[in-house]
Image: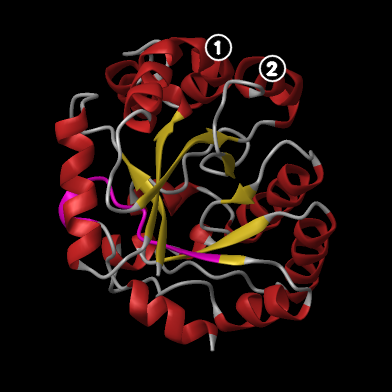
Amino acid sequence: MVDGHIHLERGEYSREWVSRFVDQALACGLHEIWLLEHCYRFREFVPMYDSVCTYSDYINTWFHQKAGVLELSDYLHLIHDIRQHPFPIKIKFGLEICYFKEFESFVVDTAAGKGFDFLLGSVHFVDGFAFDHKPEHWSHVDVDTVYRRFFETSIDLANSGIYDGIAHPDSIKLFGHLPSFSLQPYYEELACSLSRQNMYAEQSSGIYRRCPGTAELGMTHDLLVCMKRHHVPIITVSDAHCPKDVGAKIPELAALLE
C-alpha cells in the first residue's frame, strides 16, 4: 500500500522528524510514502500569490503568517540527506504547487530540474477565492460559477504538462455545496486530459477526515468511474500533515478502487 501525499511542514527538517512518519507508515502496513511540502512555504514561490492576497483580508493575513518561511534549498538539503541514509520503506519526495495559469512558466523555471521525484499540481484558489478555508466564506459566492471555474482550472492544470499528478481532484465538495448542473462533462474532460498527459489522480482521505459531515471519502463515485474508464493511474493518499495521520483510511480508499 502507498500513501502518496504526506506533508512535513509541522516539524523541523531532520532525519528524526522523517523517521516519525516512517514509523507510522510501517505500523499501517505501508510499503511506500511520498513526502512533500506546499510550495508557498518557500520564498521563491511567494510572488505567485499576490492576486490571492488582494482578494481578501483573511487570506492576506493567513498567507503572511504561513508563507515564505523557508528557502527551497532548505528542503533540497533535507531530501539529499534522507537519500543518503537507508530507511525500511521506500520514500519519494515532491512538491505540491498551487496552480495559476499565468504562472506556468514561472513554475517550470523554479521547480523543474531540482531533483524532485514528483510535482503535484493542486487547485486551492478559484479566481482568488480560497474555497477550502472556511464554510462561511461561501455565503457570498455563486456555487455554480465556483464549480465551473474549479474544474476549468483543473483541466488547465492537467493540460499544462508541468505536473506528474493532480491533488484531491474534487476537493471543491468539502463543505457540501453542490452545483445545479451535471458535472459529468467536466469529469470526462479532466480524465481525458490527465490520461493524455500520463498524470495520476489522488484518491484522498484528507477532505473526509477534515469534513466528515459534508465530504465523502475519496473521489465522488462518478468521477472515480470516469478516471478508471480513461485509465488514469490512481494513488491512495492521506494528505497527512502530522505523523499520526499517515495511512489514514488507505485500506478503505483502496477498496473503493475495486
- Relative side of 191 to 81, left or right: right
Q: How is the image coloured?
A: secondary structure
Where is residue 190? Give x, y as percent.
75, 61
Q: Which residue is denoted by mark 2 in the rendering?
A: 106
Q: Amino acid at mark 1?
A: Pro
What's the distance in space between the residues labelled 2 and 1, CA to CA? 10 Å
Is residue 128 on the magenta stretch?
no
The numbered disc on residue 47 is 1
How many numbered marks are there? Answer: 2
Question: Closer to us: mark 2 or mark 1?
Answer: 2
Q: Up-down: is 128 above or below 41?
A: below
What residue is rendered at 49% in x and 37% in y? 94
In the foreground, 29 or 71: 29
Disc 2 residue type (three-letter): Phe
Residue depicted at x 52% and y 38%: 129
Residue 104 lies in quadrant: top right
Q: Where's residue 144, x and y in %?
A: 64, 61
**Earlier along the polypeptide chain: callout 2 or callout 1?**
1
Q: Which residues are magenta?
A: 235-245
Residue count near mark 2 (Cα–Cα under 10 Å), binned few <14, some 14–19, many ≥20 = some
